[in-house]
Image: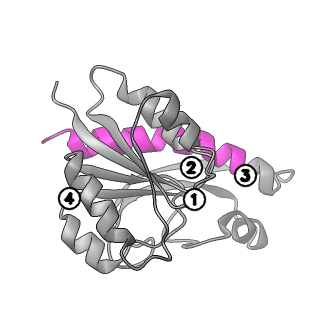
């Protein structure tokens, strides 16, 4: 099976990165994690990349040329797919247009509800009965691209921020690989 070289962008713990690395080792999974980009040098997810000998690019998003550094490395590693996995920076319109290949994001809510940050607080504030996560294509508008897959669960009365985050991550670890398989099913 031909696997597509994939770059995962992270900013934090990297639980989705870890999960995608594990899935990518399966023979029938359509991607290989070939590069990790982080906008934080101390992101814990970098540990998973190092343990698996995956090249890492740390960017300083305050440097106005940081996207050129990313593009250089995307070309260098022949990247065919970008997965945003807890990447806490907005991708520029120019970047999206110039890449011309799929960019997927995983978001911790049932889009179109609760775009952006603080999703768990919003879910609790508005007393939602269920929540989950969404994997979608990235476009020029925040959390507005075509939805590939959603995973949902019901919220119990005892759920708080931490519980919601844990339950959502469990859903994310199922949703992201399923969305990638779905993306490449008919290619």
Is 161 on the left or on the right of 89, as rendered?
Answer: right
Compared with residue 25, is residue 165 higher up or lower down, i.e. above or below?
A: below
Q: Considering only order in the chain, which callout, 1 or 3, is on the residue closer to the N terminus? A: 1
Q: Considering only order in the chain, which callout, 1 or 2, is on the residue closer to the N terminus? A: 1
Estimate the spatial distance between the alpha carbons at disc 3 and disc 1, rounded to whole Å: 25 Å
Element class at badge 1: loop
Estimate the spatial distance between the alpha carbons at disc 2 and disc 1, rounded to whole Å: 30 Å
Estimate the spatial distance between the alpha carbons at disc 2 and disc 4, rounded to whole Å: 28 Å
Q: Which residue is mark 2?
A: 152
State the mark number for residue 9: none
Q: Which residue is mark 4?
A: 101
**Is residue 60 inside the magenta stretch?**
no
Q: Considering only order in the chain, which callout, 2 or 3, is on the residue closer to the N terminus? A: 2
The foreground one among 70 and 185 is: 70
From which residue to which does the magenta span run?
164-187
Q: Residue at x 39, y 40 (%)?
A: 55
Outermost residue to the left: 187
């Amino acid at each position: 099976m031909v696997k597509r070289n994939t770059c995962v962008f992270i900013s934090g713990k990297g639980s989705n990165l870890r999960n995608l690395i594990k899935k990518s080792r399966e023979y029938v999974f359509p991607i290989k994690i070939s590069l990790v980009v982080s906008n934080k040098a101390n992101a814990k997810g970098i540990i998973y990349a190092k343990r698996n000998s995956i090249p890492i690019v740390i960017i300083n998003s305050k440097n106005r040329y940081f996207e050129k550094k990313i593009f250089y490395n995307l070309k260098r590693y022949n990247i065919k797919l970008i997965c945003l996995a807890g990447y806490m920076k907005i991708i520029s319109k120019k970047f999206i247009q110039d890449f011309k290949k799929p960019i997927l994001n995983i978001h911790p809510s049932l889009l179109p509800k609760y775009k952006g940050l603080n999703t768990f607080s919003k879910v609790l504030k508005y007393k939602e009965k269920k929540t989950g996560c969404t994997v979608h294509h990235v476009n020029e508008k925040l959390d507005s691209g075509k939805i590939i897959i959603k995973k949902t669960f019901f919220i119990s009365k005892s759920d708080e921020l931490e519980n919601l985050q844990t339950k959502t991550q469990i859903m994310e670890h199922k949703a992201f690989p399923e969305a990638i398989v779905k993306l490449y099913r008919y290619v």
